[in-house]
Image: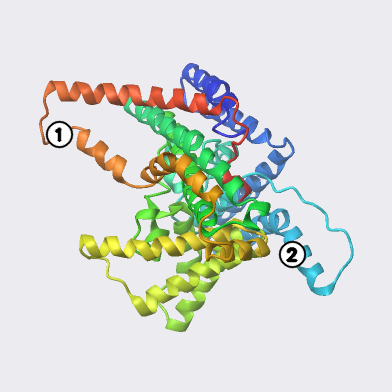
Amino acid sequence: MVFSELFFVFFFLVLCTGCLLFAKSIKRQNLVLLLFSLIFYAWGGPLLILLLAGMTLVCYLGALAIDALEDRFYKKLGLLMTVAICLILLGFFKYSTFIAETVKGIVGFDGKIPNIVLPIGISFYTFQLLSYVIDVFRGEVRAQRKYWILLLYSALFHQCVAGPIVRYQTVCEELESRTVRLADVSSGIARFASGLAKKAVLANTCGALVAELWAKNTLEEASALTVFLGGLCYMLQIYLDFSAYSDMAIGMGRMVGFHYNENFNYPYAATSVTDFWRRWHMSLSSFFRDYVYIPLGGNRCSVGRQIFNLFVVWGLTGLWHGASWNYVLWGLYYFLFLLLEKFILKPKKDCSFLTALWRRIPVLIIVYFGWMLFYFEDLSMLSSALSGLFGAHGWIDLYGKTTLLCNVFFLGVAILACSPIIPALGRLLLPKQEKPYSAARQAIVGVLYSILPVALLLLSLIFLVGNTYNPFLYFQF
């Protein structure tokens, strides 16, 4: 089940919201959310609940032990044992087949490699539970005494499957004491509707174009224009798809009183590669910063050690995204550019508008080629795409030209949706307290903010009916 399915939007979410209306106390609301979260997760495989519940139990008991122990040595031992169990489980389900295939390729082993099913969302809820246990060890939060509350935190269907990675300290108070305000419900519905439209209308269309433009038989004779359009569509799709999921997760959380942190901040407007990663999937970037990079020494060490720390972080970042060598290479690809910026280029943060505009061009080029490396698990197809991009089969063909002309308006809208222009226009319309506006203008703004979510929901419904292409890209991670 995905957020953009009609069944989820018009049955599951409506039924869950209706049950919450009848649950007056926080405890009853939490029980309703836990029940629906387990049903949601079991939709992808009922037995997978056992893994989620089991890993949550390990972290629940580990955090209780860490919180109760006074000796620093035994606290560390409890932390290491808990983290090790979680990482072993993650490694077994996500990387054992990859490791076996790699070993088979090296030693020439002829045996059959078992196909282990990857549990949906395992990377996300593993990182959430690890952040909880580590924060208990650091004394930043107290251990949760109720197992079912911690299970609700790890299984909450808003963000369990594909993020954002919500830290326990962000929602620990709201798990047991929260107030649902009308303004939160209204903004949550609007956020969910905008995310659904972003996914159903824009991301799905981009994905369908990518599937056509970068099909194996197409790439064998594709012109530079055709390959470029495929890369542009994938660049748009992966942002629109993932940020749409985050929008819907944040919106649904706000509707029931949870305030999750933002996960994207218009990364394609970045002025450096470092800035890009401060804006893209911010919950993952901050996780690796706070739980890997800084504990390794961060910037407070020699240059050689800083390079090693960055290498570890970006090797793990690539590997986290998937059990394939192209993801590892993708992580190291960014490691090299971040190294270049940090120690050689050293771009200044403050610059003029024109300088900032100029800096965005090389960043977009770097990100574009990065997404090509990210997309093609088959490196031979990556080679075909790169050779085609540089004119091996000509620069413009009829197929690429026709595709561009038929979708030029759509691509313009998709690019606009990836930029901060629309929210900037919204801020101009939204009345500010310190600046009085006429009653007529306030009425117009009120009507717009009331109509837009409904219009977006209807538009999404039109696109979802009969649409067979409706995946979420980050489910596989």
Q: Position of residue 195 (x, y in %)?
A: 44, 36
Q: Position of residue 474 (x, y in %)?
A: 57, 47
The correct choice, above or below, for 16 with respect to 216 in the image is above
**x 74%, y 47%: residue:** 117
The correct choice, above or below, for 305 with respect to 257 in the image is below
Secondary structure state at the residue bearing disc 2: helix
The answer to which quarter of the image holds residue 332 is bottom right
N-terminal of the pair, mark 1 or mark 2, is: 2
Residue nearest the viewer, comparing 78 with 32: 32
The correct choice, above or below, for 317 with respect to 444 in the image is below
Q: Position of residue 229 (x, y in %)?
A: 50, 52
Residues marked 1 and 2 touching at CB (< 8 Å): no
Secondary structure state at the residue bearing disc 1: loop
Q: Position of residue 352 (x, y in %)?
A: 20, 63
What amino acid does circle 1 point to?
Gln
How far separated are the C-alphas under marks 1 and 2? 58 Å
* Tag 2 residue: 99
What amino acid does circle 2 point to?
Ile
Residue nearest the viewer, comparing 164 with 275: 275
Residue nearest the viewer, comparing 139 with 373: 373
Residue nearest the viewer, comparing 170 with 340: 340
Residue 360 in sight: yes
The answer to which quarter of the image holds residue 303 is bottom left
Residue 77 in sight: no
* Tag 1 residue: 433
